[in-house]
Image (cartoon, coloured by chain):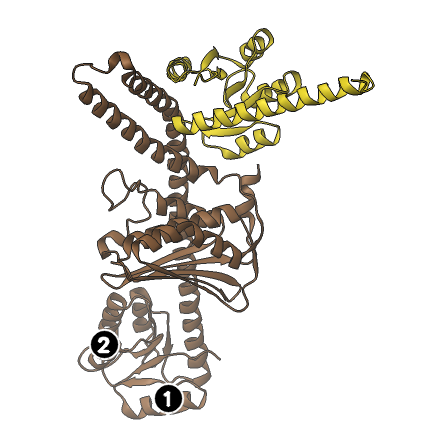
């Protein structure tokens, strides 16, 4: 069976971390992009299609929470998993209230990460599927149901 | 009137007895001594507030006796009795440390007044001493608390900084491990060695991660959220969390809730953390067939939480150290030595107190007292 890779965007100012986790996720069969700041993350989302953003909370400049809010506003279908470096679950939970799918504490367990990536991906697929169905219904109604 | 413990020293028996009798009528039950030597003997065993001491005595005279009293019992006040019109003796006495002197023949009212004054002086000095002791103790506690707080802040900073490189190590090792599973590397030479070493790296990272997370946990408590907590429910929920480990080991956990226990205004997450830490320790320390009892009860304006186990107990030399950070008797890698350190700092922040008693081979009892109305301590974190 051919697995469709999840398109993951890793966002963290720790370059080495992003690089190694990218390699690892690619090795596991995902399609990974990297961004080293909140702004870069938004630029990439603008240009390419992404399923899940793995977002570090603590970054210089635009931090994770700000970036999350911007993502929710501009790319509401993209799922976000928060990464917290300082174990402050409060911020992460706050992020989930704002719509993030889940959070992970650094250094994260890889199995945890892949499980959560899959979960996020599933939620996004399901949502897109619902939208498609709704659109189809809408079309039917517009055409007066005269099929 | 306060009870004054008085010792009356005079070699003239008639005089001494008469004074003692009259003092008795005024509510002062004086002990009597007929010589300086006898006086010092009595002071060895009986606590006395004030000594009334005749200067002229055969054998050891008053001034010499006074010297001894001031040397061995500096807290005792002494009133000298001098012969008629010999103020020189009295002056010598005051120079040696007597409270005052009276010339014979004495008037009882005079003596009484002096005795009371001497006693008051002593009481005041003791109160002052108590205040001083208290102040010193408080200062020492403050220093200890500040030192711990500084240590905590430092540790958290270090922990935070270490988490990032740890994540890099973990992802690097994980990446290599995943490459090793590829078909192209199926026949790589010494593959098992690589796998073994990568496994060790992964385990080492996990161990370091546990430490950093616990350290951060100890400082994170800054942001406290207090709420009305149902203690019975909290205990039940928490026991469920450690129950599995206890059942596996054959240890029974008994919950007891005092009759008047309802709710407590506190931080439920932190209190649960405390319960988990102590219960887990108890499970680890208790042999199969043993029992752990967790009790919540009301004790004068406070909620007392007692967790008692029938475990191996804590040796006396360890008892002092168990709250220090990084002290652990578990093998390296199993205990971080932070559990009780974190527990203690949580209890401090919740405004409570914690005591531990232990008997080797019999078990250990942790007793935590939490205030029913916590004061500002918990509010510190809201900033």
* Closer mark to the observer between disc 1 and disc 2: 2
Q: Position of residue A130 (x, y in %)?
A: 65, 24
How many angstroms separate mark 1 from mark 2 (CA)?
A: 20 Å
Residue that lies at the very extreme toward the right in this rendered image: A144
User: B303 or B98, which is in the foreground?
Assistant: B303
Chain containing mark 2: B
Q: Position of residue B325 (x, y in %)?
A: 32, 42
Q: Position of residue B254 (x, y in %)?
A: 40, 63
Pick the quarter of the image with the C terminus of chain B. Answer: top right
- The residue that label 2 is drawn on is B40
Q: Secondary structure at mark 2?
A: helix
Give the chain letter for yellow.
A
Q: Secondary structure at mark 1?
A: helix
In the rendered structure, the answer to whether residue A6 lies left or right of residue A65 reads left
User: B49 or B166, which is in the foreground?
Assistant: B166
Height in image: B78 above or below B292?
A: below
Give the color of chain B as drawn.
brown
Give the quadrant of residue B122.
bottom left
In the rendered structure, the answer to whether residue B52 lies left or right of residue B305 reads left
- The residue that label 1 is drawn on is B19
Q: Position of residue B24 (x, y in %)?
A: 41, 89
Q: Earlier in the sequence, mark 1 or mark 2?
A: 1
Tag shown at residue B112: none
């Amino acid at each position: 069976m051919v697995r469709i890779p999840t398109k993951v965007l890793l966002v963290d100012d720790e370059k080495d971390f992003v690089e190694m986790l990218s390699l690892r996720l690619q090795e596991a069969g995902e399609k990974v992009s990297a961004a080293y700041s909140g702004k870069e993350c938004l630029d990439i989302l603008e240009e390419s299609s992404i399923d899940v953003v793995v977002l570090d909370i603590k970054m210089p400049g635009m931090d994770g929470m700000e970036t999350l809010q911007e993502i929710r506003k501009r790319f509401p279908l993209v799922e976000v998993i928060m990464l917290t470096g300082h174990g402050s679950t409060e911020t992460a939970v706050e992020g989930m209230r704002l719509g993030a799918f889940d959070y992970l504490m650094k250094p994260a367990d890889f199995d945890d990460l892949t499980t959560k990536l899959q979960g996020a991906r599933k939620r996004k697929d399901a949502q897109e599927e619902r939208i498609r169905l709704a659109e189809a219904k809408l079309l039917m109604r517009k055409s007066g149901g005269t099929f | 009137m306060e009870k004054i413990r008085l010792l009356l020293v005079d070699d003239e028996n008639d005089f001494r007895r008469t004074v003692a009798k009259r003092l008795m009528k005024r509510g002062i039950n004086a002990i009597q001594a007929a010589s300086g030597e006898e006086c010092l003997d009595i002071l060895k065993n009986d606590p006395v507030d004030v000594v009334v001491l005749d200067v002229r005595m055969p054998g050891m005279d008053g001034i010499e006796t006074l010297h001894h009293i001031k040397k061995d019992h500096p807290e005792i006040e002494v009133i000298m009795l001098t012969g008629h019109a010999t103020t020189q003796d009295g002056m010598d006495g005051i120079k040696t440390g007597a409270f005052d002197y009276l010339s014979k023949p004495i008037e009882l009212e005079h003596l009484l007044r002096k005795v009371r004054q001497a006693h008051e002086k002593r009481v005041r000095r003791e109160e002052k001493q108590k205040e001083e002791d208290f102040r010193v103790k408080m200062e020492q506690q403050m220093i200890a608390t500040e030192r711990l707080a500084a240590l905590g802040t430092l540790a958290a900073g270090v922990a935070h900084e270490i988490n990032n490189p740890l994540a890099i190590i973990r992802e690097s090792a994980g990446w290599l491990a995943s490459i090793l599973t590829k078909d192209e590397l199926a026949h790589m030479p010494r593959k098992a060695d690589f796998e073994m070493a990568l496994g060790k790296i992964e385990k080492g990272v996990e161990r370091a991660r546990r430490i950093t997370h616990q350290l951060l946990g100890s400082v994170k408590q800054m942001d406290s959220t207090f709420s009305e907590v149902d203690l019975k429910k909290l205990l039940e929920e928490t026991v469920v969390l450690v129950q599995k480990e206890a059942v596996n080991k054959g240890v029974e956990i008994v919950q007891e809730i005092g009759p008047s226990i309802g709710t407590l205004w506190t931080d439920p997450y932190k209190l649960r953390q405390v319960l988990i830490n102590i219960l887990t320790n108890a499970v680890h320390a208790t042999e199969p067939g043993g029992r752990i009892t967790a009790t919540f009860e009301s004790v004068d304006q406070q909620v007392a939480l007692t967790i008692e186990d029938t475990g191996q107990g804590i040796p006396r030399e360890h008892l002092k150290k168990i709250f220090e950070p990084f002290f652990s008797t578990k093998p390296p890698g199993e205990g971080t030595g932070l559990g009780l350190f974190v527990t203690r700092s949580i209890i401090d922040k919740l405004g409570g107190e914690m005591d531990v008693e232990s008997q080797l081979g019999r078990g250990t009892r942790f007793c935590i007292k939490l205030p029913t109305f916590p004061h500002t301590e918990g509010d510190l974190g809201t900033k």
